Amino acid sequence: MNVTEAVTSRRSVRQFLDKPVDLETIQRVMDKARWAASGCNYQPWEASILTGEPLKELQAKITSTPPQELEYDWNAPLAEDEYKSRLHGISKGMFEALGIARDDGAARIAAMGRNATSFDAPAVMFVYFPRMMKEPQWSDTGMWLQTVALLLREEGLDSCFQEFMAYYANVIRDHLGLDHDRYMLFCGMAIGYRDEAAPVNAFERERVPLENQVQFLGWD
């Protein structure tokens, strides 16, 4: 698989097969991802990847604990209609693929609740970094996460980024033995093999036209 194929075939997978992820495969991916770019070579990201009983134990804690107040805000873009419409568009596609009506609030909440068990992914990565890290290092962590996602595609694996896990930062830090004062829990990442038959893994996603985002200057 070349880079273009990895980029265009990557999507947020929300239904995984009951198929384990081989340790050597995930280690190979993570070892290559160390070469992701970071400003000043800080490499701020840290992570724990769980499967089997350690993952089940954590998920049991998450599903039995009320969500906490978020430590960072991912909803600020909703202040502008353009960004709000993009969220509504992807949500509409996802819920229609799941066969959930717009006015079925209970079913929508249940569908979103599947984030707690990472859509039955066999492995989940939890990503964190020292609280001293600022916006540039958060960006570096995002570049690393994208690198991981593309390397997973090269191996035939799929993923789903989960900022949702920030609702359970305290539970996750406790389970992983992380110092609450030192570490910010950034996100989770579900990892596994996509269920090709699941409609939620196949609905169309819109992307903003290139000319709306990028300008090219200096060419004739």
Image: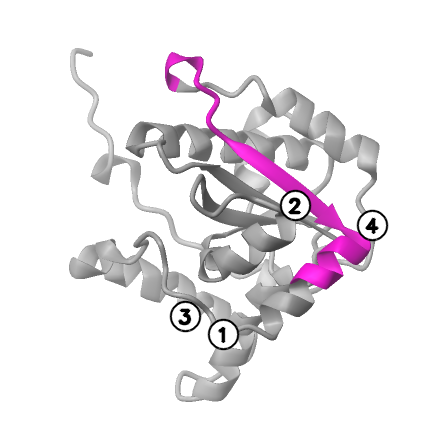
* Mark 1 or 2, nearer chain start: 1
- Whole-angstrom CA distance, mark 4 to mark 3, is 31 Å
* Mark 1 or 3, nearer chain start: 1
Percent x, y of residue 194: 70, 53
* Mark 2 or 4, nearer chain start: 4
Q: Is residue 90 above or below residue 147?
A: below
Q: Which residue is mark 2?
A: 158
Q: Is residue 44 magenta?
A: yes
Magenta highlight range:
39-58
Q: Amino acid at mark 4?
A: Pro
Check the picture and name the quadrant holding the C terminus. Answer: top left
Q: Is residue 108 left or right of residue 15?
A: left
Q: Which residue is mark 1?
A: 66
Who's the residue at 50% across and 57% down the image?
Answer: 170
Q: State the mark number for residue 20.
A: 4
- Whole-angstrom CA distance, mark 2 to mark 3, is 22 Å
Q: State the mark number for residue 183.
A: none
* Mark 1 or 4, nearer chain start: 4
Nearest to the eye among marks 1 and 3: give it.
1
Pointer 3 local density, CA inside 10 Å: few below 14, some 14–19, many at least 20: some
Who's the residue at 37% across and 29% down the image?
Answer: 137
Q: Is residue 146 visible?
A: yes
